Image (cartoon, rainbow, N blue to C red):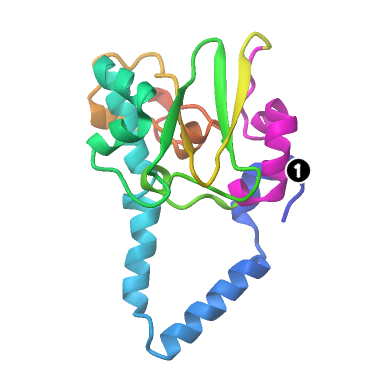
């Protein structure tokens, strides 16, 4: 695994982790013994990576950007407002949504393990579960943000929220300029997974195609 200075590249490691190798070995054994259907497994993984994943969270954010009443409900009772759009399930029962503003930037971490809001963000990225992120996000949040290419003015307060087994957090990123008149689907395309964790910003219309 790369060092602290390469947090954003953890999920591109050339060598699988020991845990990943064990999981792959177990998966192969289960398939070999006929206990697991590989196609069903692929469908499950795809569901959490794409359907039950960041696209769900992006829809929540886009609705909040478009509907002030929904945004108020989302910031007041996050879990219930998210459930209005049909996104519920394991690790998403109790949700708090925190809003980025001109004066405040929020970032989410789980210092004890890797608690993560699966129904709206899907599978957690490798770097989110890595020890360097979990430790540095608390003691050096601006440094971590810089590793992700996000530099904020000193006037912006950075708040770090620590997820637990009982409570998950979702960041409501700022709506980019130049998006007036865009539909919810168009707005959702601007929302990135990292922007909902707080390690990134929403795309602007001119950078819509970037990662």
Above or below residue 189? Residue 31 is below
Above or below residue 116? Residue 28 is below
Residue 211 visible at all: no
Q: Main secondary structure of the magenta part?
A: helix
Q: Position of residue 86 (x, y in %)?
A: 24, 42
Q: Position of residue 81 (x, y in %)?
A: 29, 31
Q: Which residue is mark 1?
A: 4
Q: Position of residue 154 (x, y in %)?
A: 68, 11
- The answer to whether 68 appears left or right of 112 in the picture is left
Q: Residue at x 27, y 29 (%)?
A: 186
Segment colored magenta:
127-153
Front position in the image: 112 or 1: 112
Q: Quadrant of residue 40?
A: bottom left
* Magenta segment includes 62: no
Q: Quadrant of residue 64?
A: top left
- The answer to whether 169 appears left or right of 51 in the picture is right
* Magenta segment includes 152: yes
């Amino acid at each position: 695994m790369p060092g602290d200075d390469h947090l954003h590249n953890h999920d591109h490691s050339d060598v699988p982790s020991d845990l990943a190798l064990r999981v792959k070995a177990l998966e192969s054994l289960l398939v070999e013994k006929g206990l697991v259907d590989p196609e069903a497994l692929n469908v499950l993984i795809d569901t959490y990576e794409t359907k039950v994943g960041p696209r769900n969270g992006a829809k929540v954010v886009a609705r909040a950007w478009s509907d002030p009443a929904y945004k108020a409900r989302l910031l007041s009772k996050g879990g219930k407002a998210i459930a209005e759009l049909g996104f519920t399930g394991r690790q998403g029962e109790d949700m708090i949504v925190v809003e980025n503003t001109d004066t405040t930037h929020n970032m989410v971490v789980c210092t004890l393990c890797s608690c993560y809001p699966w129904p709206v963000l899907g599978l957690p990225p490798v770097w989110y579960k890595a020890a360097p992120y979990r430790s540095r996000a608390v003691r050096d949040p601006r440094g971590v943000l810089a590793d992700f290419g996000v530099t904020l003015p000193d006037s912006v307060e950075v708040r770090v929220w620590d997820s637990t087994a009982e409570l998950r957090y979702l960041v409501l990123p700022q709506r980019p300029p130049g998006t007036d008149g865009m539909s919810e689907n168009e707005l959702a395309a601007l929302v990135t997974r990292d922007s909902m964790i707080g390690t990134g910003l929403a795309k602007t219309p001119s950078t819509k195609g970037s990662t």
